[in-house]
Amino acid sequence: MKPAMETAAEENSEQSQERKVNSRAEMEIGRYHWMYPGSKNHQYRPVPTLGDRASLLSSPGCFECCIKCLGGVPYASLVATILCFSGVALFCGCGHVALAGTVAILEQHFSTNTSDHALLSEVIQLMQYVIYGIASFFFLYGIILLAEGFYTTSAVKELHGEFKTTACGRCISGMFVFLTYVLGVAWLGVFGFSAVPVFMFYNIWSTCEVIKSPQTNGTAGVEQICVDIRQYGIIPWNAFPGRMCGSALENICNTSEFYMSYHLFIVACAGAGATVIALIHFLMILSSNWAYLKDASKMQAYQDIKAKEEQELQDIQSRSKEQLNSYT
């Protein structure tokens, strides 16, 4: 009986304290309204609790989504793809036009007989068709490598959830590494081959500059300065005239075909060099992606074994508990 009376007394004392607190708060609010009459119509908004603040922070906004999407972009593969597209476009476009200009220069000045340079014309026409194929192939190959970079980067793994690597995926990544290595070696040869016409046109241009120089201009020795295209092996030795000297050679250097072809060959050579750099960049990216897939497969196998062992341990513990319960 006594404990009940004590609890009732404690409850009464708590209620009286709450009334005092409430009355004191009401008195303070009334005093505030009496001092500032315009504040009676003020609407008090509840202060957000800690849970409300956490819910606001946990809901992702547009900025967070953009940052997350940008984090999933493989920037290394993107830069390599842009560099590869630019190099191949420069090589194919400039090389195609420069080859056509070279044929026009040969036909007009160095080989007037069509049968003398018939083989060279067929080879150049074949190279122009090969340029079309190179442009189409590398357009598709660059997109495939960029897609492979998207799906093997760790940022994409975080965006799309955990993925499981397979032996087929690792085999495809290894195949891309090998194919990119072979293409890189082939483009080194293309880069060296594209430097040959630059060397030839540079020799012709430097000879023309010697003819235009004040020391030789207007002298009798100008007509003895010649360029023989036959020594480069692109036309046979019986081609006529095969060589140009003096003022005739200077007129060739002043033509738009020579000027355009010379500079286009330089740009094509630079494009081939850019493609080689892009393929080397791709090779480094693919090697790192293949290593990542290999490590991910090992981690996946470890997690599968660990989960299997934990499941077996749980089964053993559950059976032991059932046996203990049956004994009791």
Image (cartoon, rainbow, N blue to C red):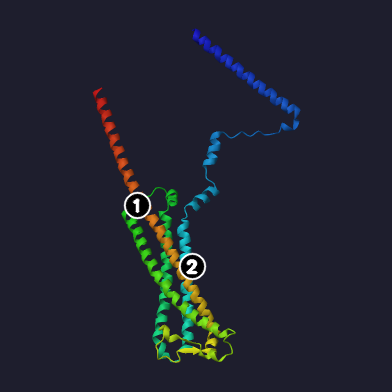
Residue closer to the observer: 88 or 204: 204
Q: Is residue 25 above or below residue 177?
A: above
Residue 263 in view, yes or no: yes
Where does the image place residue 251, in percent across and percent down from the top left? 55, 87
Where does the image place residue 214, in percent across and percent down from the top left? 60, 84
Residue closer to the observer: 9 or 183: 183
Q: Residue at x 46, y 73 (%)?
A: 92
| Element class at badge 2 | helix
Residue 164 in view, yes or no: no
Q: Residue at x 36, y 58 (%)?
A: 173
- Horizontally, residue 31 falls left or right of residue 169, namely right
Mark earlier in primary sequence (1, 2): 2
- Give the amino acid at mark 1: Lys
Mark 2: few/some/many CA within 10 Å (<14, 14-19, 20+) = some
- Looking at the rendered structure, which numbered label has been put on residue 10? none
Please count the marks in the image: 2
Q: Which residue is mark 2?
A: 86
- Horizontally, residue 285 falls left or right of residue 47, namely left
Q: Is residue 29 above or below residue 314?
A: above
Distance CA(mark 1)–CA(mark 2): 32 Å
- Looking at the rendered structure, which numbered label has been put on residue 294? 1
Where does the image place residue 177, in percent across and percent down from the top left? 36, 61
- Give the amino acid at mark 2: Ser
Q: Residue 280's image quarter?
A: bottom left
Where does the image place residue 32, in percent across and percent down from the top left? 72, 27
Q: Is residue 253 above or below residue 174?
A: below
Mark 1: few/some/many CA within 10 Å (<14, 14-19, 20+) = some
Residue closer to the observer: 189 or 144: 189
| Element class at badge 1 | helix
Picture quarter with the C terminus: top left
